[in-house]
């Protein structure tokens, strides 16, 4: 019902600083169109696509491409979705937006705004393997009831390393994080040798914090914050 996942869209006041940050971690730029009337860039590690928006947008937002948008959103209306933003017409770039129960923005647009780079130029980033977009929730049942009709599949809640419910789809996995330690969504990465990755990041001058669930050992897990405020959760995996 949402179309094809495009990017995690971020309001980025200083795009050059954010670009340098992500590129220093191994992300590469994609070729963007001139759709937006403000500076815009996209970086990727091959799995995760991050849209850096120089103009004001609700942030973060999950952006999907839904062709023939004006007609294609009718099933969402019929399902009771209330759109917080609608821009539809023959002479505009069609887009709509609505919120999940946590207040996260879901943004639907009618066409792509960038072209993915050649996969031969992409390597695993210094952060490890991108696993999911983590959403802090208070009511997991309400979040499951929201995402499942939209084409996502919710698994059973896991208790280790903290209470989280994986919610999967073909191009984007979500994690419903039931913890008070995280106050905003995070980009979650995992690696079986995260301790070594964290050591290399510190050696390169990256500032890492332990503002994460207490169950995560700060010698093998950390938070890395991007210039625009996005938080990257770097976690030790078992395999």
Image: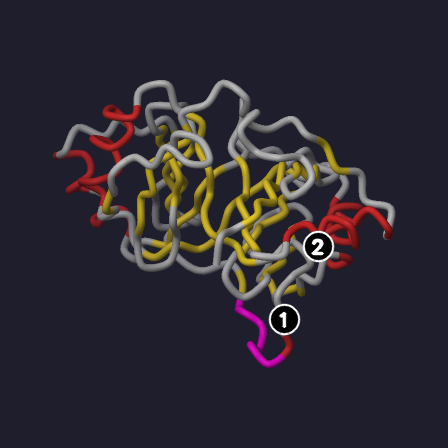
Which SS class for mark 2? helix
Q: Residue at x 57, y 48 (%)?
A: 236
Specify whether 46 is left or right of 29: left
Q: Is residue 118 magenta?
A: yes
* Circle on res. 200: none
How many C-alpha atoms fall within 10 Å of the one at disc 2: few (<14), some, or many (≥20)?
some
- Residue position marked by numbered label 1 in the rendering: 123
- Residue position marked by numbered label 2 in the rendering: 197
Q: Is residue 177 magenta?
A: no
Q: CA distance from mark 2 to mark 1?
A: 15 Å
Q: Which residues are magenta?
A: 115-120
Q: Residue at x 36, y 26 (%)?
A: 84
Q: Mark 2 or mark 1, which is nearer to you?
A: 2
Specify whether 130 is left or right of 218: left
Tell which residue pokes out farthest to the bottom in this image. Answer: 120
Give the x, y percent position of residue 86.
36, 34
Upstream in the sequence, badge 2 or badge 1? 1
Given residues 181 and 2, the one toward you in this image is 181
Q: Is residue 226 above or below residue 30?
A: above
Q: How is the image coloured?
A: secondary structure
Which SS class for mark 1? loop
Q: Residue at x 44, y 32 (%)?
A: 135
């Amino acid at each position: 019902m949402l179309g094809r996942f495009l990017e995690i869209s971020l309001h980025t006041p200083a795009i050059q600083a954010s670009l340098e940050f992500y590129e220093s971690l191994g992300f590469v730029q994609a070729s963007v169109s001139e759709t937006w009337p403000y500076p815009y860039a996209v970086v990727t590690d091959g799995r995760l696509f991050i849209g850096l928006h120089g103009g004001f947008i609700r942030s973060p937002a999950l952006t999907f491409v839904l062709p023939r948008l004006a007609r294609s959103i009718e099933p969402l209306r019929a399902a009771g979705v209330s759109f917080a933003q609608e821009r539809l017409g023959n002479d505009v770039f069609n887009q709509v937006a609505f919120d999940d129960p946590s207040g996260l923005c879901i943004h639907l647009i009618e066409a792509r705004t960038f072209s993915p780079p050649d996969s031969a130029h992409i390597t695993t980033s210094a952060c490890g393997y991108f696993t999911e977009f983590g959403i802090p929730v208070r009511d997991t049942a309400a979040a499951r009831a929201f995402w499942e009709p939209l084409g996502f599949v919710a698994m059973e809640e896991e208790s280790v390393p903290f209470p989280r419910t994986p919610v999967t789809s073909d191009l984007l996995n979500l994690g419903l994080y039931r913890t008070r330690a995280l106050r905003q969504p995070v980009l979650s990465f995992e690696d079986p040798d995260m301790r070594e990755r964290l050591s290399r990041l510190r050696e390169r001058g990256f500032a890492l914090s332990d503002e994460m669930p207490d169950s995560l050992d700060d010698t093998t897990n950390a938070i890395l914050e991007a210039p625009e405020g996005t938080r990257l959760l770097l976690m030790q995996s078992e395999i």
